[in-house]
Structures are given as C-alpha cells and as structure tokens.
Image (cartoon, rainbow, N blue to C red):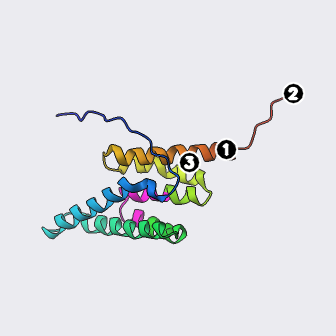
Amino acid sequence: MVQKAKVPVAPVRVENWEAFLHANDALLKEIKQRAGALKKGPAGNEPAELASLRMTNRARGMIEKGSPGSALELLERSISMYKGNGYAYMFLAYVHHLQGRSARGAEFLSSARRYLPDDPRVHGELEGLSRSIKSNTESRAPATRRAS
C-alpha cells in the first residue's frame, strides 16, 4: 500500500464566510461526483448521502446570504441523514461560532476533521476555524482566582 505524503496544512484566517472558498468548492465537486455515480445505479446509502450533501449545500447558500440561523436546522438534518458529512460538521461549527456559541462549535470540529476529504486547502480552512473558535472560547473562559 502506497502512503500519501502528508502535506502541511496552512491555517486560513476565519474572518467571514469567504474564508471557506475551498470547502465550498470541494462540497460542490463531491455532489457532482456522487450524482454522476448514482446515475450508474445506487449502491448502499448513496442516495441518502447525496441528499445530505445537497442539503448541506442549501444550508451553505443560506449562510452565504446572511441567514446562518436558518441553515442550522438543515445542517443538523443533513447529519442525521449521513453521519459522514464532514462539510455539515464544519459549517455547523462555523454557525455556532458565528452566533456566539464557540464552545458548542468546537464540539463539531473533531467530526469535521474525521470526515472531510483529504484536501490540505479544506483542512487549512478547518484549522483556521479551529483557531478562531479556540481563541474565542479562551477569551470567554471565566478567570480563576488564585488562593491567598
């Protein structure tokens, strides 16, 4: 078995939705590939997986148009249809972070890492989101008192 060389991941600053350019492109590419494969005949859970990815893409469009709250339910439904939808986990983490629930967003990061495709650009965006969430979570953590 040939092992892939690990490409270093360069974190992307997550200031706004445009930071997810590569994840958006990769999602659309995966939808197109799965739709093409499905035309040859369904196998296993492929129809549900494709429906989940399409639902995630609709949620992505809602986020892009400034309605992340509306996207939240779609993203949760898309995960219930296909647990391996890394894009839905990533976008859920982003929406929760955007709405001030960074700790909740952090819960979705490990699943996103597990299920996203092996694309260093997408993982760079995920790492940028992870750093942003971590920074926000740490800044909101209550200060601990030192014992006198």
Mark 2: secondary structure: loop
Along the viewing direction, whichever of 104 and 134 lies nearer the viewer: 134
Q: Name the residue under label 3.
A: 133
In this view, the residue in front, 139 or 85, is 139
Q: What residue type is labelled 1?
A: Ser
Please tell me in which quadrant of the rendered image residue 82 appears. Answer: bottom left
Q: In this view, does 59 lie above or below 13?
A: below
Q: Where is residue 31 in the image (x, y as percent from the top left)?
A: 27, 64
Which residue has dot 2 on it?
A: 148
Return the residue at label 1.
139
Residue 141 rendering spot, x and y as whole percentages:
69, 44
Q: Disc 3 or 2, which lies upstream in sequence? A: 3
**Residue found farthest to the left:** 40
The mark nearer the N terminus, 1 or 2, is: 1
Residue 77 makes an appearance in the image: no
Magenta stretch: give its range. Answer: 78-92
The label nearer to you, 3 versus 2, is 3
Q: Overall secondary structure of the magenta stretch?
A: helix
Q: Where is residue 41 in the image (x, y as percent from the top left)?
A: 14, 68
Q: Is 145 within the magenta?
A: no
Query: Could you say whether the residue bearing mark 3 is in a helix, strand or loop?
Result: helix
Left or right of residue 113, residue 97 in this image: right
Residue, x 42% and y 55% (percent of image)?
20
What amino acid does circle 2 point to? Answer: Ser
Q: How far apart are marks 3 and 2 (CA)?
A: 33 Å
Mark 2 residue crowding within 10 angstroms, few (<14) / some (14–19) / many (20+): few
Q: How far apart are marks 1 and 2 (CA)?
A: 24 Å
Is label 1 in a helix, a strand or a loop?
helix
Quote the CA–CA distance across marks 1 and 3: 10 Å
Which mark is first along the chain, 3 or 1?
3
